[in-house]
Amino acid sequence: MEKLKQPHQILIVDDMPKNVQVLGQILAEQGFNIFIATSGFQALKAVEKKMPDLILLDISMPEMDGFEICKQIKEQDKYSEIPIIFLTARTETEDILKAFAVGGVDYITKPFNIPELLARVNQQLALKEKTEDLRKTNESNKALLRVLLHDLRNPIVAIDSINQIFSENQEVYIEMNDILQQATKNCMEILDSVKKMYTIQDQKYTVDLKDINLFESVQTSVIIFKNLLHEKEIEIDINIPKDYYINVDTNSFTHSVIDNLITNAIKFSYPNSKINITASQNENQIILSVRDFGIGIPVKILETIFDITKPTSRPGTKGEVGTGYGMPLVKKFIEMSGGSIEIKSVVKPEKDHGTEVLLYLNRSK
């Protein structure tokens, strides 16, 4: 029998106390959390109050039979994925076909055969767990694709801007060749970072932690934002001691973590404002701070900002758009390197409005 990942909630719907007692005892002994309804109306109310992972539903019920109960549950989108196993003394083909037609996933005949009952219950719950895992993986993959497109945009915009300058002034192009080369390199390393994320999900990748210079890493990231900073007339003040070394996954830190934090700071800053990037240290960690003085983050968005299933996209101070999926990836990369992240924010018009993102990073040994 396949081992389930967690204790599950099972709703038993049967108007016969003896059946409820027998079923409840069998399932409770296996560690399942049981709750009970003795009529169709009670069952519908019970599902609304506490969504079960599985429903065991008797067909022969007074007032509203099991077929109708199942039909009403399945018609509601938020409950439609709950697996329903019918309990029946009927063995006629017509009844069994009807049970599947209204949305049942299986049926168990009375009187109950305990091993068969447990096998069918476990099978459906294991299938539900796998389906949920697949859904989460799919959501994560979609989010990674959105973040990839978002992160690639920054260096590509830099390359495009320099190409336009080149067509007008070759001397300036020569001066900006370093930025062009860095932007191109960033594109390749961003692709490499996303590839790592996929292999991490498949548990086929070990994070490649290296000691890197924090100041140089931030400078590498900032260079591709030169035009965006110029367009909004935003000044970046970097105050990081040049002897600070951190232990992180190099590509993901520079081209996903830092790039995302700077992109957000620019996006939500007002024109003619400032962004401060500073660092301090304690015994084991270096704390990197990226602080803007922009519009701030509302509490509702801040509460779900790291949830990859709840995108938090909103326009910037000049209408800039984004995916809203950057911060979940930032958190994932930081935690992969053994660090943590904290966000403090005050929404305008409050005094000292703006956002500060704090990264707690492991110091190099």
Image: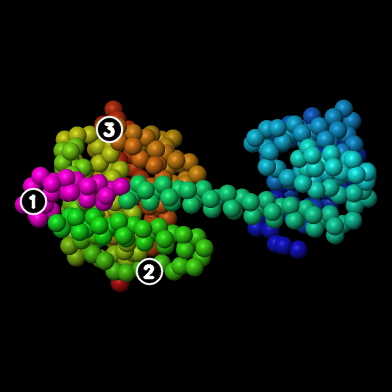
Rendered position, 313 above or below 278:
above
- In this view, the residue farthest toward the front is 167
Q: Which residue is drawn at 15% across and 58% down?
A: 178
> Is 322 placed left or right of 269 in the picture?
right
Query: Which one is closest to the eye, mark 3 or mark 1?
Result: 1
Q: Which residue is drawn at 69% across and 58% down?
A: 4
Query: What is the spatial separation of the Cα atoms under label 2 and label 3, in whole angstroms?
Result: 37 Å
Residue under label 1? 170
Give the image location of residue 48, x and y in percent. 69, 33
Rendered position, 210 above or below 131:
below
Q: Which residue is drawn at 22% across and 34% down?
A: 270
Q: For the residue labelled by badge 1, is the local secondary structure a helix, a strand or a loop? A: helix
Give the image location of residue 62, x and y in percent. 89, 30
Name the main secondary structure of what is drawn in magenta.
helix
Q: Which residue is drawn at 46% across and 59% down?
A: 198
Residue under label 2? 208
Query: What is the spatial separation of the Cα atoms under label 1 and label 2, in whole angstroms?
Result: 40 Å
Range drawn in magenta: 153-176
Quarter-wise, where is residue 298 in the image? top left
Residue under label 3? 317
Please state which amino acid type lies under the numbered disc 2. Asp
Rendered position, 205 above or below 258:
below
* Magenta segment includes 345: no
